[in-house]
Amino acid sequence: MQKIITSKPLNQNKMKQTAVEWLENEMQKTYIFNQNDFDMFKKAKQMEKEQIMFDYINGVIDTLKGHENVDSDKYYNEEYGKL
């Protein structure tokens, strides 16, 4: 497993863009959205937020338990299935 090391502080002024936000922005360049489209993206963003929060909390718990070497690919495949 490869550890990702960064020297950047966790809290920066620039917010990260999620995959759902990126997709929504790209689609808005070529499609005209109706209210149903906006509602679907709102729901998708909420689901993605819940997944990120769940995974973050579980990562903290695993770290506190001493499980430092977690295989992220294995975890993803078990939780979300293979791509």
Image (tube, helix red, strand yellow):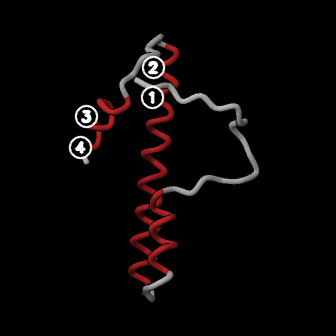
Q: Residue furthest top?
A: 66
Q: Estimate the spatial distance between the alpha carbons at disc 4 and disc 3, rounded to whole Å.
A: 8 Å
The mark lying in front, picked from 2 and 4, is: 4
Hey, what amino acid is under mark 4?
A: Lys
The residue indicated by pointer 2 is 62
The residue indicated by pointer 3 is 78
Hey, what amino acid is under mark 1?
A: Asn
Q: Estimate the spatial distance between the alpha carbons at disc 2 and disc 4, rounded to whole Å.
A: 22 Å
In what element is the residue under mark 3?
helix
Q: Estimate the spatial distance between the alpha carbons at disc 2 and disc 1, rounded to whole Å.
A: 6 Å
Q: Estimate the spatial distance between the alpha carbons at disc 2 and disc 3, rounded to whole Å.
A: 16 Å
Q: Residue at x 51, y 56 (%)?
A: 18
**Quadrant location of residue 36?**
bottom left
The residue indicated by pointer 4 is 82
Left or right of 76? Residue 31 is right
The residue indicated by pointer 1 is 58
**Relative height, residue 13 to residue 79 (above, below):** below
- Looking at the image, do the residues carrying marks 1 and 3 touch, with CB atoms under 8 Å apart? no
